[in-house]
Amino acid sequence: MTGAVWLTEADVAETVALPDAVDAVRAALIAEHEGSAQTMAKTALAWGGGHTLHALGGLDRSTGFVATKTWAHTAGGAEPVLAVWDAETGRLVAMIEAFALGQLRTAAVSAVAIEAMAAPDASTVAIIGTGKQALPQVAAALDRREIDEVRVFSPTPAHREAFAERLRPHVATVVVCDAPPTADIVITATRARQPVLHHVAPNALVVAVGAITPERAELDADIAASASLVVSDSPDTAVALSHELDGATEVVPLNAVVAGGVTVPTAGHRVFKAMGLGLADLAVAGEVLRRAAGRGVPIAERRRAAPRWFP
């Protein structure tokens, strides 16, 4: 691309599929572990009745890109955007509408964690919560393991029934549950303010993606406290913002697990806490840019203008 472009949600969805995003995120995590990529810590501001402003970003020297993503999550919705610059010149490369990109990133990070941390013979998934993140999270598990049964729970019966119908074309068996179920892989994707998961199977992997601000909680505190391994894509942020992990003795970075620097125990349940990783957004964005030649609306060349200092 010779000039900066604006890429839409359709551009993202039509150029990158989940397996592509998984490969890109895995490579970025390994680069982070080796020191050639960095993540900008996530920051957030809250106001009103649960509205939040977020920003996060990353640098990958192998691609030469640096990026930040920002959005305001409000009762009226959210419209995230990701800005990509050339890491050496500071030149704007692209502005990318980032709702689909963010879903791909979140699912890809979970897929990488499942690939590294779930039992090799894991065949059942429990999904707790049936909102916008639920389908991508189930897709992440299906992409990494031979799953033959998905167990669905939402506190709203109509929601769990409707979600189960969406899954049935893709999974051999879908079971609708009237209480949070257990499984080989348990995914929590809710906006709960009180724990909804209190017990897990002895060798299960828990993938917790919903509670990323201090007032939210999906897991009983004992789940992390008694886990044989607790991992996060952003350990410092997880410790600071997730009270679910208060009892954990250590939170290991996902990049160390993926790169082979940490051995995953075969006994005991494991927890992966997803907080949102700016580097993963950049990884997916880099894959979009690599595949999006000829797409996008050119952004007008930026020309500096002196501000008016006096009336």
Image (tube, rainbow, N blue to C red):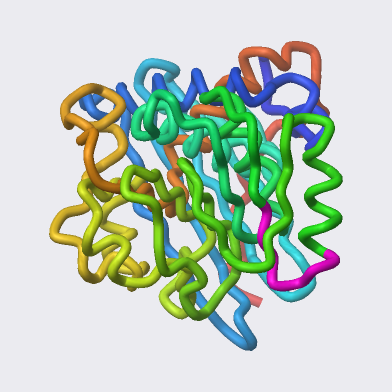
Q: Position of residue 292 (x, y in %)?
A: 72, 16
Q: Nearer the viewer, residue 222 or 294?
A: 222
- Whether 154 is among the magenta residues is yes
Q: Is residue 211 left or right of residue 237?
A: right
Q: Quadrant of the C terminus?
A: bottom right
Residue 171 visible somewhere in the drawing: yes
- Whether 155 is among the magenta residues is yes
Q: Quadrant location of residue 284? A: top right
Residue located at (65% from left, 60% from top): 129
Q: Position of residue 304 (x, y in %)?
A: 61, 43
Q: Nearer the viewer, residue 97 or 171?
A: 171
Q: Nearer the viewer, residue 16 or 172?
A: 172
> How many marks overall?
0
Q: Quadrant location of residue 217? A: bottom left
Residue located at (43% from left, 54% from top): 275
Residues in magenta, as a range: 152-158
Q: Is residue 2 left or right of residue 146?
A: right
